[in-house]
Image: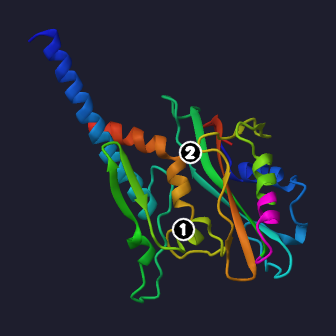
């Protein structure tokens, strides 16, 4: 089977290796209380599984393809230009280069998709002293529909 | 019937099927973004529960416009729509949710598969 949490943790591990990421106290993870600093950059993430259909004729023990989106929001201080915020977004994009493939502990194969490839949007103010650039990474994970 | 007639029939049917697949795929993509979809996993556009006249403003702002026989534009003109799509305020929505456009884009191959299956059925 494919464990979404395993995928999520693998994607987070890639993100945490980005050198320009803010320090640990300025990283917001899922289901953890977090109050962003008003004076320091921070990052937030959404892990959004899209489904995991069995794509083989055989269902039990068949082949499963899970897909989803990992959204990373890189916040910087508003009014100081785009350079720092966009530079961090580009570092994140580079870490999740399309085609990057990881074999998870379960043996399932996680791949960053090339269509749609990772992309970063416009830098927009959030109305709370910060501006933000969102990077969206589409992934797929392939594995077998076996009992855990 | 001559070979040329058969070819003309085939061409006409292919064109009609292409048009039908495009119509169905456009409808499914629009539904995925606005209402949510089991095909793509998109949650659809959040609707406030405040019972104010503005409830559903984002959902109702999305439009679908035929640009050419094989091109459809799905868009909104609300300036704050990207805030919701990217979830830049890190909300926990009571219904529906963010990233519907990204999930619809990711699941577009599945949308086309569903459209083809519906047209050839």
Please determine whether, in this image, residue B79 is positioned above or below residue A16: below
From mark 1 to mark 2, how far is it between C-alphas? 19 Å
Please determine whether, in this image, residue A100 is positioned above or below residue A56: below
Location of residue B77 in the rendering, given as x and y in whole percent from the top left corner: 45, 70
Instruction: Name the residue rendered at 8%, 12% in the picture.
Output: B1
Tell me if label 1 and label 2 are in contact, CB under 8 Å: no
In front of the other: A10 or B103:
B103
Position of the C terminus of chain B, as image quadrant, is top left
Instruction: Name the residue rendered at 48%, 28% in the picture.
Output: A57
Q: Secondary structure at mark 2?
A: loop
In front of the other: A35 or B79:
B79
Location of residue B4 in the rendering, given as x and y in whole percent from the top left corner: 16, 13
Q: Which residue is mark 1?
A: B97
B11 vs A39, left or right, is left
Range drawn in magenta: A78-87
Is residue A79 on the magenta stretch?
Answer: yes
Is residue A8 on the magenta stretch?
Answer: no
Chain ID at mark 1? B
Residues flagged by tags 1 and 2 on a common chain: no
What residue occupies the far left of the structure in this picture? B1
What residue occupies the far top of the structure in this picture? B2
B121 vs A86, left or right, is left
A128 vs B1, left or right, is right
B16 vs B86, left or right, is left
Instruction: Name the residue rendered at 86%, 61% in the picture.
Output: A21
In front of the other: B77 or A102:
B77
Q: Residues within 10 Å of mark 2 (few under 14, many from 20)?
A: many
Q: Is residue A139 visible?
A: yes
Q: Which residue is mark 2?
A: A52
């Amino acid at each position: 089977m494919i464990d979404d949490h395993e995928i999520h943790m693998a994607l987070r591990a890639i993100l945490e290796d980005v050198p320009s990421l803010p320090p640990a106290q300025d990283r917001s993870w899922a289901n953890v209380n977090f109050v962003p600093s008003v004076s320091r950059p921070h990052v937030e993430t959404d892990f959004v599984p899209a489904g995991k259909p069995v794509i083989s004729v055989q269902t039990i023990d068949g082949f499963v393809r899970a897909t989803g989106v990992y959204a990373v929001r890189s916040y910087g201080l508003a009014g100081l230009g785009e350079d720092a915020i966009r530079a961090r977004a580009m570092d994140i994009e580079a870490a999740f280069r399309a085609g990057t493939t990881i074999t998870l502990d379960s043996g399932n194969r996680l791949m960053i998709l090339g269509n749609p490839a990772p992309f970063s949007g416009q830098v927009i103010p959030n109305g709370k002293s910060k501006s933000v650039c969102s990077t969206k990474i589409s992934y797929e994970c392939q594995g077998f529909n076996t009992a855990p | 019937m001559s070979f040329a007639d058969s070819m003309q029939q085939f061409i006409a049917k292919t064109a009609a099927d292409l048009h039908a697949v495009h119509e169905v795929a456009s409808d499914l993509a629009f539904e995925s973004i606005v209402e949510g979809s089991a095909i793509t996993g998109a949650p659809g556009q959040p609707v406030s529960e405040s019972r104010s006249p503005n409830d559903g403003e984002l959902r109702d702002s999305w439009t679908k416009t035929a640009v050419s026989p094989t091109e459809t534009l799905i868009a909104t003109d609300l300036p704050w729509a990207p805030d919701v799509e990217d979830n830049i305020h890190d909300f926990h929505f009571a219904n529906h949710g963010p990233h519907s456009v990204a999930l619809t884009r990711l699941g577009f191959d599945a949308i086309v598969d569903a459209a083809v299956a519906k047209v050839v059925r």
